[in-house]
Image (spheres, rainbow, N blue to C red):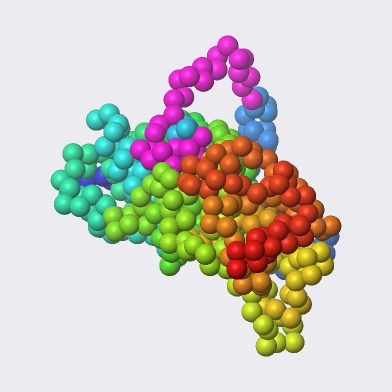
């Protein structure tokens, strides 16, 4: 039975730990929390922080400590820090090729989005493919080991309790960060998962688990042991109502990578992105599909996002968007109807509201479409979020198509940015977009090379429809 070893505080003979409240605006210190800073007058800016009073500064050791200087010749070569594959190509792509030894990765997402499921799948894949002495510590501050075992059995089927690596997966049901660090130093595992960082706390601070002071201090301590021992570590983080990872922004500066798992909770797709990555690019995305066993990789996202798309229906346009180095085709759907309100509605799902308002104004001004009295609803099929300007042309064409009740050509995709003057602008990586579109049967991709003005493009597809009729 795995036991937790009480932590011996590092440097306890030469330093004394205490907590102090510091104003985040002017660094004024107080022994207790106060609402308004007496120095700068700011409100609610005091955060509890661990303060270390060194005995050397009081003259007990006769001098001040000197930091150790390390020449380049003594630094370990980079090739010894090999990457560890997660067993999932989509996840490896987002991480920059795999998990780097000693890296600290913070993964955030809404409750129930699949953070623990994804990490459990990574644990299963790594233990299935790594050496027999490879061990993982799973610090379960929110779940019990029995709950995690049920998830493993669901993912592995009947093999859940018969796996050969069950002795190498060590559960640590504790929320005491000092005890967890002591166990990590004693066992020296190959990978550590902390689920979640908001549940961890230290007795050196009086704040409750999840408070700003606790989050900052606990993350710093865990990151320090990960760097010193060269142990990769995943930290699960909660998110706020605004969708940002809970806690101070300094958490993202402490860790090496910040991962974001997003998607519609009721949908079937999950997207893994990097907000920050010291060992790889931040423009990659991993696509996963929710299945009964957990999360399955989607190697061809274009086919998935276009699944169920209809032909010869007004209001549908295809756009090749870029996510990192890969091109993906998604469907833009628009619905334009007469408004029953004094102020017509503009509703977007997967597309920002200001963009819909801007494009509607351009279409009304330069194309003469009567959108001032129309409700406009725009949706990205499949729960995908489009934020690059290259989708402007497809959004505008979908709105125009629905307004005129004229379907767009079935073999055509659209890629272009639209300016306030109604001009169509060039987009980057057009060749990759065209190649992906043609691979899926779209023989033509309309861009600035085909139309300089959105008004001319709207008139052209209307005239083609008129000739056919």
Q: Is residue 317 above or below residue 132?
A: below
Task: Return the residue nearer the eye: 67 or 191.
Answer: 191
Q: Judge left or right: residue 445 versus residue 157.
A: right
Residue found 41% across the figure and 38% down from its top: 89
Q: Dividing the image into 4 quarters, which one contains the C terminus?
A: bottom right
| Residue 201 placement (x, y as % from top left) | 48, 55
Q: Is residue 75 magenta?
A: yes
Q: Quadrant of residue 38?
A: bottom right
Q: Judge left or right: residue 296 versus residue 432.
A: left
Residue found 48% across the figure and 47% down from its top: 441
How many tags in the picture?
A: 0
Whether residue 456 is visible, yes or no, is yes
Task: Return the residue nearer the eye: 17 or 297.
Answer: 297
Residue found 64% across the figure and 79% down from its top: 337
| Residue 198 placement (x, y as % from top left) | 49, 57
| Residue 105 placement (x, y as % from top left) | 50, 43
Whether residue 203 is visible, yes or no, is no
Q: Is residue 418 magenta?
A: no
Q: Is residue 127 above or below residue 117?
A: above
Q: Give the extent of the magenta segment.
A: 67-96
Task: Return the residue nearer the eye: 131 or 27.
Answer: 131
| Residue 33 placement (x, y as % from top left) | 67, 64
Q: Judge left or right: residue 361 versus residue 138.
A: right
Q: Judge left or right: residue 430 versus residue 373.
A: left
Residue found 64% across the figure and 33% down from its top: 56
Task: Return the residue nearer the eye: 434 or 244.
Answer: 434
């Amino acid at each position: 039975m795995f036991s937790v070893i009480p932590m011996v505080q590092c440097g306890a003979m030469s330093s004394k730990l205490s907590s102090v409240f510091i104003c985040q605006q002017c660094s004024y210190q107080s022994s207790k929390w106060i609402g308004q800073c007496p120095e700068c007058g700011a409100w609610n800016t005091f955060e509890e922080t661990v303060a270390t009073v060194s005995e050397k500064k009081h003259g007990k050791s006769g001098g001040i400590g000197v930091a150790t200087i390390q020449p380049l010749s003594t630094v370990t070569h980079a090739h010894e820090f090999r990457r560890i594959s997660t067993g999932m190509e989509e996840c490896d792509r987002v991480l920059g090729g795999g998990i780097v030894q000693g890296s600290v990765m913070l993964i955030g997402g809404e409750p129930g989005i699949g953070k623990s499921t994804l990490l459990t799948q990574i644990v299963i894949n790594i233990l299935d493919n790594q050496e027999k002495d490879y061990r993982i510590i799973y610090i379960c501050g929110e779940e019990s080991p029995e709950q995690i075992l049920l998830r493993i059995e669901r993912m592995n089927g009947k093999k859940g309790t018969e796996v050969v690596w069950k002795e190498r997966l060590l559960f640590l049901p504790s929320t005491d960060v000092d005890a967890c660090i002591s166990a990590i130093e004693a066992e020296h595992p190959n990978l550590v998962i902390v689920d979640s960082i908001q549940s961890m706390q230290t007795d050196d601070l009086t704040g409750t688990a999840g408070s700003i002071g606790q989050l900052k201090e606990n993350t710093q301590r865990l990151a320090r042991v990960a760097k010193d021992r060269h142990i990769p570590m995943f930290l699960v983080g909660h998110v706020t109502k605004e969708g940002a990872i809970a806690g101070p922004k300094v958490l993202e500066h402490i860790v090496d990578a910040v991962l974001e798992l997003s998607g519609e909770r009721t949908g079937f797709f999950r997207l893994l992105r990097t907000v920050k990555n010291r060992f790889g690019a931040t423009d990659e995305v991993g696509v996963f599909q929710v299945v009964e066993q957990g999360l399955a990789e989607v190697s061809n996202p274009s086919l998935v996002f276009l699944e169920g798309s209809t032909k010869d229906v007004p209001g549908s346009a295809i756009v090749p968007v870029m996510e990192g180095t890969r091109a993906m085709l998604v469907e833009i759907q628009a619905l334009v109807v007469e408004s029953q309100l004094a102020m017509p509605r503009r509703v977007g799902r997967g597309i920002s509201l200001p963009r819909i308002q801007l494009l509607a104004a351009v279409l009304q001004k330069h194309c003469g479409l009567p959108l001032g009295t129309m409700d406009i609803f725009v949706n990205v099929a499949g729960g995908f979020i489009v934020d690059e300007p290259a989708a402007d042309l497809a959004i505008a064409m979908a709105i125009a198509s629905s307004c005129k009740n004229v379907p767009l050509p079935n073999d055509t995709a659209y890629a272009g940015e639209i300016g306030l003057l109604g001009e169509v602008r060039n987009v980057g990586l057009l060749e990759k977009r065209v190649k992906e579109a043609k691979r899926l049967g779209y023989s033509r991709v309309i861009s600035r090379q085909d139309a300089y003005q959105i008004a001319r493009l709207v008139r052209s597809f209307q005239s083609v429809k008129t000739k056919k009729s």
